[in-house]
Amino acid sequence: MSCCIKPFQHEVRLKREGYDNVENIAEANPIEMAVRTGFSYSQLKSWVGEAWLRTQFGLDYNTLFRDTGVRTAYQLKLFKDKPELLVTETNQKRIQDKISCVTELLHDWDPTHFSSDNNAIEL
């Protein structure tokens, strides 16, 4: 028996609590997820940030990651005031436009205010 949790066990634990697709994870509150699933807050924060960014970029997510190294919304949020710093010679115009649009959405993005029952969680 292995001392580590296998990847499929992660999926089972998430699905059991209703986090069965990228969209559900993208809109989840990582604090609430930590309580419900037993995963660490830092891991869930990363997963929520990645899921949110994947839903925004769609099929272009892998290109964004390859060209910029940005994997999560939290990382992209660091560039929200200067998205042009992410523009490289290899970025396609479509990716550059998405970076600009998505960084605008990040101004109001804060997953700690999401809740499964659509009520704000007071911290």
Image: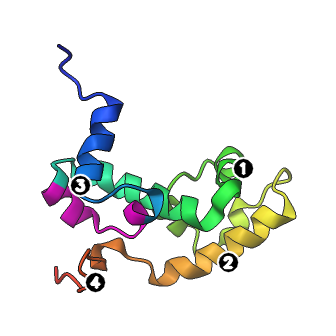
Total residue callouts: 4
Check residue 101 in the rendering and tell me which mark sits there, or answer none: 2
Marks 2/4: CA distance?
25 Å
Segment colored magenta: 24-36
Give the structural element (helix, strand or loop) at label 3.
helix
**Residue 66 placement (x, y as % from top left):** 69, 44
Give the structural element (helix, strand or loop) at label 1.
helix
Q: Please report contact status of discs 4 and 3: CB closer than 8 Å, yes or no.
A: no
Closer to the chain start, of discs 1 and 3, is 3
Amino acid beneath label 2: Cys
Instruction: Give me the residue at 15% from left, 58% from top.
Output: 36
Closer to the chain start, of discs 2 and 1, is 1
**Relative to the observer, which residue lies in front, 4 or 104?**
4
Q: Please report contact status of discs 2 and 1: CB closer than 8 Å, yes or no.
A: no
Q: Please report contact status of discs 1 and 3: CB closer than 8 Å, yes or no.
A: no
Instruction: Give me the residue at 35% from left, 72% from top.
Output: 111
Q: Viewed as shown, does residue 100 lie left or right of 28?
A: right
Residue 31, placed above or below residue 14: below
Magenta segment, prevailing SS (helix, strand or loop): helix
**Residue 74 placement (x, y as % from top left):** 45, 63
Residue where numbered disc 4 is placed = 118
Give the structural element (helix, strand or loop) at label 4.
loop
Amino acid beneath label 3: Tyr
